[in-house]
Image (cartoon, grey):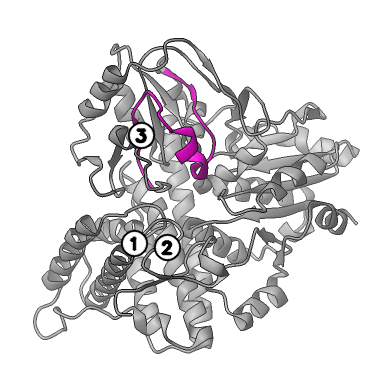
C-alpha cells in the first residue's frame, strides 16, 4: 500500500527486519515516516546543489537540524517535519543558479528498494551521518564548528545518492567514522571549555518535596538556560536519562537547585513519568509517545516535536515549564527512588580528564597485577528483552577488573556497588553517548603507556546499540581499527550478510551470546 512505511534504522525494528505498515515500533506513524523520507530526499538534493557552491553557515546548521530530526525518537510530528523540509528546499534553491534541478528531491526509496549490499553500505553512511549530525548540533549551539565536519554531511549524502558500487562506498563508510571522531573531539572540547572538566560526582536518586522539573535528552546548553531561569524560583531541577552526567560539570554543579537524578533510561519513561507531579522537558531525542496520564506536562524544544505537545521555541523562554512546575507543586514529601538494581545513588564524571589525571596509578595497577582487565560496557539502552545481559555481564566481571561505561546503557548496572580495585572504582561512568571520545582517549593513552596497539590492551568493548548515534560511534571504532567488539542485543537489520561478513572478517565483530560464555571467551 502506498501509505505504508518502511524503516529499519533502529535496533528494535519489527521482527529484526524492518517496520512496515501504518506505524513503527517506536510509535512513529507511516505519515511521519514518509515525511522523514521526503526530508532526507530534500537534504540529499541540498547536498547535490552544494557540490558546486559552498553553503553558508546557516545552511550548514540547517543540514545538521534536518539530519538530527530523522534520528529515532526525535520527531513524531509531520507538520513540523514538512516545515523543515520546505526550509531545506528553499536553501537548495538559493544555491542553484539555474537549471540545476532545484525543484527535484532525491527519492530515498531507490535506496531502500535497491541491491541488498549497496543498500546496507548506504544505510551505514546515512545513519552514521544522522548520528554525527546530533553531535555536531550540540557543539554548534555552544559556538563550536568545524568546516571539515560540516562539509562532510554534504559529501556523505551525495554518496548515498550516487551510483557507486561496494568498492566505492566502503571507504566512505569508514570515512564517516574518521570524521565523527573529529566531531566527537569538537563536542568534548565544547563541553569542557564551556562547563569545565567533569569530576567524579555521586548523584542522589531522591526527589525533595516541592515543585520540580525533570530534564531529559542530551543538551547541556538547554539545561543551563533552564537553571538560569529557575534561580530563586523555588523550583528544583532533576536530570533524567542521558542528562545525568551534567552533575559532574563545575559550571552546572554550581546551581544549588540542580538536585539529583529522576528515573533511569529513556525506555522506562512511560512508567516512570506516569502521573508525575512535575513537567518534563525533552531537549533532544529519546521521546516516547506520551501517555495521557502525563501528556499535559510534557514540553519539547529544539528538534523534538510531538503533535499537540507544547513546544519551546528558539528564544528558549521556559516560563511555561516553570509555571507548570509551580502549578503541579511536586511531591508533598521527600520521595526516595532507586535504580533498577535497588541502589539509591549513582556516580558519574569519570571523563578522560579525570581518568588520565591518575593514569600513572592505573598503569602501576596493571603492571603490579592488581588490575588485570578493562571492560567498556555501554551504549544505548532499550526495551527489547535480553538487555539484562549487560547487568549480568557486569555482575560477573572479575574483582580485578574495571568496568568503564557511558551512555544510557549504564542504567542497567550503574547503581550496583562493585567496590574498588587498587584504590580505583570498579565502575567508572564516562558520561553521555557522545563521551565515547573519553573512552577512546583513555584507551589511546594506555596503549601509549604500554607501548602497544589498541588491540593489544587487556580491554574488550561490550556494546549495546539502539539508534543512529551508536552507528557513527561504531564506525569510529572501526576507523581506529578496533577489533573483537561484542555487539548486541541484536545485529542491525540494515547490515546485509555480505557486509556483515566483511565486518566479521576484518574486525571480528561478535554478536553477544550469554554473559558466562562471552566472559569465558574474553578471559580465556
Label located before the other in sequence (3 or 1)? 1
Q: In this view, does 518 lie to the left or right of 67?
A: right
Q: Badge 2 is on which residue?
A: 24
Q: Dots 3 and 1: beta carbons under 8 Å? A: no
Residue 223 picture location, percent across and down: 36, 31
The N terminus appears in which quarter of the rendering? Answer: bottom left
As measured in the structure, the alpha-carbon distance from the residue carrying label 3 to the one carrying label 2 is 22 Å
Residue 336 picture location, percent across and down: 56, 18
What is the span of residues highlighted in magenta in the rendered image? 258-284
Residue in view at x 48 percent, y 67 percent: 176
Is residue 138 found inside the magenta-colored segment of the image?
A: no
Q: Dots 3 and 2: beta carbons under 8 Å? A: no
Provide the secondary structure element on which disc 3 rests: loop
Label located before the other in sequence (2 or 1)? 2
Q: Badge 3 is on which residue?
A: 294
Residue 58 picture location, percent across and down: 20, 56
Provide the secondary structure element on which disc 1 rests: loop
Label 3 neighbourhood size at 10 Å, few (<14), some (14-19), many (20+)?
some
Provide the secondary structure element on which disc 2 rests: loop
**326 in relation to 114, above or below:** above
The answer to whether residue 264 of the structure is visible from this angle is yes
Label 1 neighbourhood size at 10 Å, few (<14), some (14-19), many (20+)?
some
Residue in view at x 46 percent, y 71 percent: 125
Q: Badge 1 is on which residue?
A: 29
Label located before the other in sequence (3 or 2)? 2
Residue in view at x 72 percent, y 57 percent: 454
Q: Dots 2 and 1: beta carbons under 8 Å? A: yes
The C terminus appears in which quarter of the rendering? Answer: bottom right
The disc placed on residue 270 is none
Q: Is residue 319 left or right of residue 482?
A: left
As measured in the structure, the alpha-carbon distance from the residue carrying label 2 to the one carrying label 1 is 6 Å
Amino acid at each position: 500500500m502506498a501509505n505504508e512505511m518502511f524503516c529499519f534504522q533502529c535496533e528494535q525494528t519489527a521482527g529484526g527486519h524492518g517496520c512496515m505498515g501504518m506505524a513503527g515500533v517506536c510509535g512513529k506513524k507511516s505519515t511521519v515516516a514518509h515525511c522523514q523520507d521526503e526530508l532526507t530526499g530534500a537534504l540529499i538534493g541540498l547536498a547535490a546543489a552544494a557540490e558546486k557552491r559552498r553553503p553558508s553557515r546557516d545552511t550548514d546548521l540547517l543540514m545538521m537540524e534536518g539530519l538530527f530530526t530523522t534520528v529515532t525518537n526525535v520527531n513524531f510530528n509531520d507538520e513540523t517535519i514538512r516545515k523543515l523540509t520546505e526550509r531545506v528546499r528553499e536553501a537548495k534553491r538559493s544555491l542553484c543558479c539555474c537549471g540545476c534541478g532545484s525543484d527535484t528531491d532525491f527519492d530515498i526509496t531507490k535506496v531502500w528498494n535497491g541491491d541488498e549490499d549497496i543498500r546496507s553500505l548506504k544505510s551505514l553512511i546515512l545513519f552514521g551521518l544522522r548520528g554525527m549530525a546530533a553531535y555536531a548540533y550540540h557543539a554548534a549551539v555552544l559556538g563550536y564548528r568545524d568546516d571539515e565536519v560540516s562539509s562532510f554531511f554534504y559529501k556523505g549524502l551525495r554518496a548515498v545518492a550516487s551510483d557507486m558500487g561496494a568498492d566505492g562506498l566502503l571507504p566512505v563508510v569508514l570515512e564517516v567514522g574518521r570524521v565523527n571522531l573529529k566531531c566527537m573531539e569538537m563536542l568534548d572540547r565544547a563541553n569542557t571549555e564551556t562547563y569545565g572538566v567533569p569530576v567524579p560526582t555521586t548523584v542522589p536518586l531522591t526527589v525533595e518535596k516541592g515543585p520540580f522539573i525533570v530534564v531529559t535528552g542530551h543538551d547541556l546548553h538547554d539545561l543551563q538556560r533552564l537553571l538560569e531561569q529557575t534561580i530563586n524560583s523555588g523550583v528544583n531541577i532533576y536530570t533524567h536519562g542521558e542528562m545525568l552526567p551534567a552533575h559532574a560539570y563545575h559550571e552546572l554543579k554550581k546551581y544549588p537547585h540542580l538536585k539529583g537524578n529522576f528515573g533511569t533510561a529513556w525506555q522506562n519513561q512511560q512508567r516512570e513519568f506516569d502521573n508525575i507531579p512535575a513537567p518534563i522537558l525533552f531537549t533532544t531525542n529519546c521521546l516516547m509517545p506520551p501517555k495521557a496520564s502525563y501528556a499535559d506536562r510534557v514540553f519539547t524544544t529544539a528538534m523534538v516535536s510531538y503533535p499537540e505537545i507544547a513546544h519551546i521555541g528558539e528564544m528558549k523562554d521556559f516560563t511555561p515549564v516553570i509555571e507548570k512546575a509551580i502549578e503541579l507543586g511536586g511531591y508533598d514529601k521527600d520521595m526516595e527512588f532507586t535504580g533498577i538494581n535497588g541502589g539509591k545513588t549513582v556516580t558519574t564524571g569519570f571523563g578522560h580528564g579525570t581518568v588520565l589525571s591518575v593514569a600513572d596509578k592505573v598503569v602501576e595497577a596493571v603492571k603490579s597485577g592488581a588490575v588485570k582487565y578493562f571492560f567498556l560496557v555501554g551504549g544505548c539502552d532499550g526495551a527489547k528483552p535480553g538487555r539484562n545481559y549487560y547487568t549480568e555481564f557486569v555482575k560477573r566481571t572479575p574483582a580485578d577488573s574495571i568496568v568503564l561505561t557511558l551512555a544510557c546503557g549504564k542504567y542497567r548496572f550503574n547503581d550496583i556497588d562493585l567496590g574498588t580495585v587498587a584504590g580505583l572504582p570498579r565502575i567508572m561512568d564516562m558520561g553521555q553517548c557522545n563521551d565515547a571520545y573519553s573512552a577512546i582517549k583513555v584507551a589511546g593513552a594506555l596503549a601509549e603507556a604500554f607501548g602497544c596497539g589498541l588491540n593489544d590492551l587487556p580491554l574488550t568493548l561490550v556494546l549495546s546499540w539502539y539508534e543512529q548515534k551508536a552507528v557513527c560511534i561504531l564506525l569510529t571504532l572501526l576507523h581506529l581499527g578496533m577489533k573483537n567488539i561484542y555487539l548486541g542485543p541484536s545485529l542491525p537489520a540494515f547490515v546485509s550478510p555480505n557486509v556483515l561478513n566483511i565486518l566479521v572478517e576484518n574486525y571480528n565483530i561478535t554478536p553477544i551470546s550469554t554473559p558466562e560464555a562471552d566472559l569465558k571467551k574474553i578471559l580465556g
